[in-house]
Image (spheres, rainbow, N blue to C red):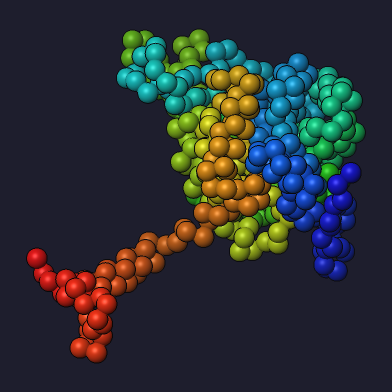
Amino acid sequence: MESLTLQSASPAAAASPLHRRRLLPVRQRATPVRAAAASAAGEPDLSVRVNGLQMPNPFVIGSGPPGTNYTVMKRAFDEGWGAVIAKTVSLDAEKVINVTPRYAKLRAEPNGAAMGRIIGWQNIELISDRPLETMLNEFKQLKKEYPDRILIGSIMEEYNKAAWHELIERVEESGVDALEINFSCPHGMPERKMGAAVGQDCDLLEEVCGWINEKATVPVWAKMTPNITDITQPARVALKSGCEGVSAINTIMSVMGINLKTLRPEPCVEGYSTPGGYSARAVHPIALAKVMQIARLMKEEFADGQSLSAIGGVETGNDAAEFILLGADTVQVCTGVMIHGYPLVKKLCAELQDFMREHNFSSIEEFRGASLPYFTTHTDLVHRQQEAIKQRKAIKKGLQSDKDWTGDGFVKETESMVSN
């Protein structure tokens, strides 16, 4: 078994109840044996180790319909996904009542077109409506059949410390490897202080993260909402409160459109609709910006070891490469699976390896965060361009003094001072 290097908490952190249960694993590169084997085979190594969790590749099933029951999660493992995050569960599933239809598509064609590439997807789906005990039994069965694969439980609960503690204890007992906390569902039950109602209120988020990290004994990822002015604020709160990682982004609040024949909104349920979460290819640039902001925050304010799981419009290996270049450790896919199916992971892996070959990268860690330093402020861009223009003008002007003439470069030096 691969050894795990642990980062010792500071004396102050060790004394805090938020850090009493788990030491942050230092992020590790691929082991020499694995890297050597991949090199010998001529294949870039896609394996990643995040918060002590070893995955064969960085592709993770995002919480939602693709992780809604034993059958589909088993299919995900069989197809080769690096990890699976189950659909969000809570203590009382009887309060969760879904409607149908609950999805609507946006195509790259005029309103109402039946054909064309799907670029946007809206859902008004709630968390799991299946009894918690049923889901937990399926988690246990999956871990029994796939003991070396990573299963992550997604949880969400009302504003009640005892309820959060009970849910965490019961889900951990099922054998999950980590927890993702749904602080970001944009629709459904905000009056119960669930989902984005917590993620949009940093004071509330800090309190609930405190409850969670007092109880949890496995790594905790806080899932961030994009429906906020500055996503770094809740990310900072979650990480300071003891979470080992953050996931971003969840869906964007939206109205998919109006049916111009019926004049009713979509998705239409008995003639009515409600705003829901927007995902798929169209959100990718927005997700890149949010992930970049969180990655910069983590690099500037937090020690290595806390992780970032990127989400948003991933349908190709190049989409994933962009997230990793910004600093993501893993890449989640949910809507992409709903559109293309579970075998999509094979295409994602092949395309990501193609990208790595093109740049001679042998492991994910070699290029993770490589593009992050190239983001700056607009003021700095102006300054950089002004300096570059000055340098180009200086070169075009040619020699500055007679002493600069050389015999070997005389013709080129003469030409450099010709104006036409």
The total number of labels drawn is 0
Q: Position of residue 127 (x, y in %)?
A: 68, 26
44 lies above or below 376: above
Q: Residue at x 64, y 17 (%)?
A: 98
The image quarter containing residue 196 is: top right
Q: Position of residue 272 (x, y in %)?
A: 47, 16
Residue 131 location in percent, x, y? 80, 20
The N terminus, quarter of image: top right
* Residue 95 visible (yes or no): no
- Of the pair 184 and 69, the residue shown nearer to us: 69
Nearer to us in this view, 129 or 161: 129
Q: Is residue 184 left or right of residue 388?
A: right
User: Which residue corresponds to the image point at 46% horizontal and 26% vertical from the top-left?
Assistant: 120
Give percent across and percent down for residue 195: 65, 36
Dividing the picture into quarters, in which one does residue 67 lie?
A: top right
175 to the left or right of 267:
right
Residue 147 vertical placement versus 306 (above, below): above
